[in-house]
Image (tube, rainbow, N blue to C red):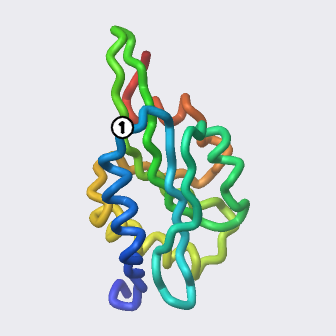
Amino acid sequence: MSSSLVVCEVDESLKEKLRKFRFRKETSNAAILMKIDMKKQLVILEEEYDDISLDDLREELPERQPRFMVYSYKYVHGDGRVSYPLCFIFSSPIGCKPAQQMMYAGSKSQLVKEAELTKVFETRNAEELTEDWLKKQLGFFG
């Protein structure tokens, strides 16, 4: 069964953008929103956002289509230290077409590997994409 699972390639320009994003110097929350070009079977950049909250990012997500996001989150710890965890979030809303669902699910690990990210989260309900949800995922209870 798994041999029929389509794993999409990652667009070369997107790989470069993800590399640059990992080493960005800005201190604001930022995101890269990615989608799959179903015809080309390619993960491509949909949009880039600078200085965007998770709430605003949630509003950008299509209602019935999966999306991949890389989110740079500014977190201020209780003792005043600041960290910027890079989070990979796979949003796969209930109600997606099964073929689309499979293509995204099958391509997720390849994309995570390309982006060299370790904080990988998944949600089936875009409504739960809040700062509190993210802190819980990251294990920050501050």
Residue 119: horizontal and vertical position, in percent?
Answer: 34, 46
| Placement of the N terminus among the 4 image quadrants | bottom left
Q: Is the residue 73 above or below the residue 3 in the image?
A: above
Query: Does 50 sit left or right of 88 as displayed?
Result: right
- The relative height of residue 32 versus residue 135 in the rendered view (above or below) is below
Residue 136 visible (yes or no): no
Count of numbered marks: 1
**Horizontal and vertical percent position of residue 26:** 41, 37
Is residue 75 found left or right of 79 in the rendered image? right
**Pick the front one: 105 or 29:** 29
Image coordinates of residue 48 in percent, x first then y, are 55, 56
The residue nearer to you, when weighing 31 against 94, is: 31
Identify which residue, 23 or 106, lies in the foreground.
Answer: 23
Vertical order, 56 against 139 (above or below): below
Residue drawn at (44%, 30%) of the image: 74
Q: Residues within 10 Å of mark 1 (few under 14, many from 20)?
A: some
The kind of residue tagged 1 is Pro
* Whether residue 110 is visible: yes
Percent position (x, y) of residue 53? 60, 37
Q: For the view shown, which residue lies furthest in the front direction? A: 25
- Judge by depth and name the residue closer to the eye, 135 or 56: 56
Q: Residue furthest top?
A: 79
Residue ID for mark 1: 85
Q: Quadrant of residue 142?
A: top left
* Residue at position x 55%, y 44% in the image: 50
SS class of the residue under badge 1?
loop
Indicate the quadrant where residue 62 lies. Answer: bottom right
The residue at the point 32 percent across, 50 percent down is: 22
